[in-house]
Amino acid sequence: MKKNKFFGDRNFYKMVFAVVVPILVQNAITCFVGLLDNIMVGRIGTEQMSGVAIANQLIFVFNLAVFGGISGPGIFGAQFHGNKDTEGVRNTLRYKLWLCTAMLIICVSVFVIWGENLISLFLSESADGGNLALTLQQGKLYLNTMLFGLLPFVLSQSVASTLRETGETVLPMKAGIVAVFTNLILNYILIFGNFGFPKMGVVGAALATVISRYTELVVIIVVMIKNRENYPFADGLFKTIKIPAKLVKDITIKGSPLMINEIMWSMGMSAIMQCYSVRGLNAVAALNIAQTVSNLFDITFMSMGSAISIIVGQQLGAGEKEKARETDTRLIVFGILICVVFGSLLAVAAPVIPNIYNTTDTVKHLATNFLWVRALFMCVYSFVHCCYFTLRTGGKTIITFLFDSVFTWIVCIPVAYSLAHFTNWSIVAVYAGVQAMDLIKCGTGFYLVKKGDWLNNLVE
């Protein structure tokens, strides 16, 4: 019986792989190209790499805000699809487009007015030296160019998320693959000035990303237009921009905590990064390398979170609550087992990959140690991530808000600040101490998921 509780049969895993593999492939290619992108920028110099890393930390807040914004209607979208309500799915997409447009306007305004001040928060004088003025200049150039890519990003994310909620994971994967290879090729051309193009450095890296985002959006739109019969929710999408008032109210009540959570969580991650940055540019550069490399291995549990949203969400929408509980348990176990393998691979790769970068031995050594910490905690990250998506899928958005961002602000940030400012611990020990806080979330997540209050049909 225990085996049946924690592990599914062959048909179960065929269903899981049908959902997860396209998402996994897209994320793997995206992260791999992101790694190559990071290496290319790193070949220019430590200051350029650090400036781009800081600018990307700010853009990360916006990206997570968009993710949180579309997650609320996404809960309803998956359940509407499970309930075979196409008009409901259509209205959730309209909601996403309205919300993301408002977020885009706010974000661009903030970055244009206060971008330089925000970058400066991550620049601290330290014993390791480093040209802070050059780092600030490079970060500003990168950020200002990246602003032109935010519009296609929010549009493609809104549509792609709806496609996944309706079970279509292949098209977003294909569009993502085209985009990342476009990004990779243009990086090689524009950063270093190959094939007769000017050498543009960090501006070339940002421009390549902007063009790739427009490419991704165009691919999605063209394929949907050519095969419109396969995407019924898109038929008549713009015949009206109105959304039923009750649905707006329901999505806002359930979705606002998710959006606020992602904004606060991403800002919390930036605040923690700022705490680390007081230890100097070497720490910033090494953390940038470690995060970019570990992203390639983190795709496993990130994809399992998406699988929980799609599969368990559709089962809840169809009223199959016990089946949803069983599926969720098996997905969590599966995610942890996969992370045992990928965590081991990351530990083996940790001493090798930083050597590719054109940076100091100190930065390479720090990056290796940060990667070993990430490898050690990978199964912890997986369990916490799956618990978060389980609670979110059942509409327990207030709980996820407390579980995720509130925990970050009342526990992780004070710990990071205290260790970074008031101890003589090495930056690696400080980093490990902050990561260990997720063990508390493991216990909380286990209790909340086992309790079962998240088993809710929101579209009955």
Image: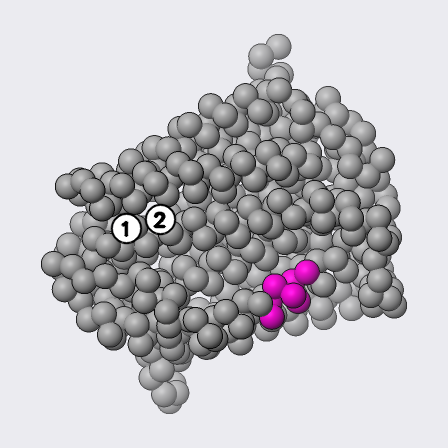
Disc 2 + disc 1, Cβ < 8 Å: yes
In the picture, the disc for residue 272 is 2
Whether 208 is among the magenta residues is no
Secondary structure category for the residue under label 1: helix
Residue 43: percent from left, percent from top:
26, 69
Give whichever of 399, 191 is nearer the camera.
399
Occupied quadrant, residue 321: top right
Q: Percent from the top left, x then y, of residue 52?
A: 35, 67
Toward the top, the furthest residue is 1
Colour scheme: one colour
According to the picture, the residue beneath numbered tag 1 turns out to be 276
Query: Do we see residue 248 in this rendering?
Result: yes
| Region in magenta | 99-105
> Which quarter of the figure has residue 340?
top left
Q: Nearer the viewer, residue 93 or 28?
A: 93
Query: Which image quadrant: the N terminus?
Result: top right
Q: Amino acid at mark 1?
A: Tyr
Label 2 secondary element: helix
Mark 2 and mark 1: Cα distance apart in space: 6 Å
In magenta stretch: residue 101? yes
Q: Quadrant of the C terminus?
A: top right
